Image: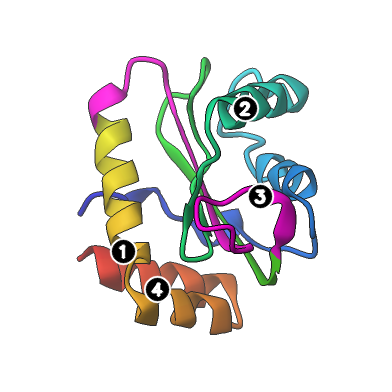
Amino acid sequence: MTFSRYLSHDRVVFLSARSKDEALKALVSRLAGAVSPFEPDDLLERLHEREGLMSTGIGLGIGVPHLRYKGVKEPCIVIGLQPQGIEDYESMDGEPVKILVLILVGEGQHREYLRILSGVVKALKREEVRKALLSARSPEEVVDVLKREDD
């Protein structure tokens, strides 16, 4: 089990956002309570800085914004789904991003950071997992799909 213990149905967002910036804002809004102190503007700025280094759009309709951030005691994952896609995500394959997985860990959690990132990417590379996520009707269903994949 590499990442599923950090999943929670209250951190699943069915996105209406069509831009990268709007999508990141929606994901960050779900982190209240997970980061102390919660400074959404600073967190967004850091995410944009990270994206400026290299887009986290890894292809296959997947974006995995990830960051080590102060005030995070336990790793957090927020899932965002946008079946129509986010066109301006600058994905490596040029395709719109439909599945976003925001991973946030504390500054000293490097090993766990890599385990989570690796597990998420491995799961999302499977087409049947991506299809199941994009057809999910509830946050609970999204979490169930990913937990099954991580077992």
Q: Which residue is mark 3?
A: 89
Q: Image quadrant of residue 4? A: bottom left
Mark 3 and mark 2: span between their CA atoms? 11 Å
Amino acid carrying mark 3 in the image: Tyr
Helix, strand or loop at disc 3?
A: helix
Q: Which residue is mark 4?
A: 144
Amino acid carrying mark 1 in the image: Ala
Amino acid carrying mark 2 in the image: Gly
**What segment carries the magenta color?**
86-111
Determine whether 101 is above or below 108 in the image.
below
- The spot of residue 143 in percent (x, y) is 44, 67
Can residue 136 be seen in this snapshot? no
| Viewer-nearest residue: 17 or 56 | 56
Instruction: Tell me what residue is drawn at x 71 percent, y 19 percent.
Output: 42
Can residue 118 be seen in this snapshot? yes
**Callout 1 touching callout 3 (CB < 8 Å):** no
Q: Indicate which disc residue 14 carries.
A: none
Q: Which residue is mark 2?
A: 52
Instruction: Tell me what residue is drawn at x 72 percent, y 59 percent.
Output: 87
Q: Which quadrant would the N terminus be assigned to in this image?
A: bottom left
Q: Image quadrant of residue 52? A: top right
Whether residue 92 is in magenta: the answer is yes
Q: Earlier in the sequence, mark 1 or mark 2?
A: 2
| Viewer-nearest residue: 87 or 47 | 87
Residue 151 falls left or right of residue 116: left
Q: Earlier in the sequence, mark 3 or mark 2?
A: 2
**Callout 4 touching callout 1 (CB < 8 Å):** no
Q: Which residue is mark 1?
A: 123
Determine whether 119 is above or below 40 in the image.
below
Q: Give the crowd class for mark 2: few <14, some 14-19, many >=20 residues within 10 Å.
A: few
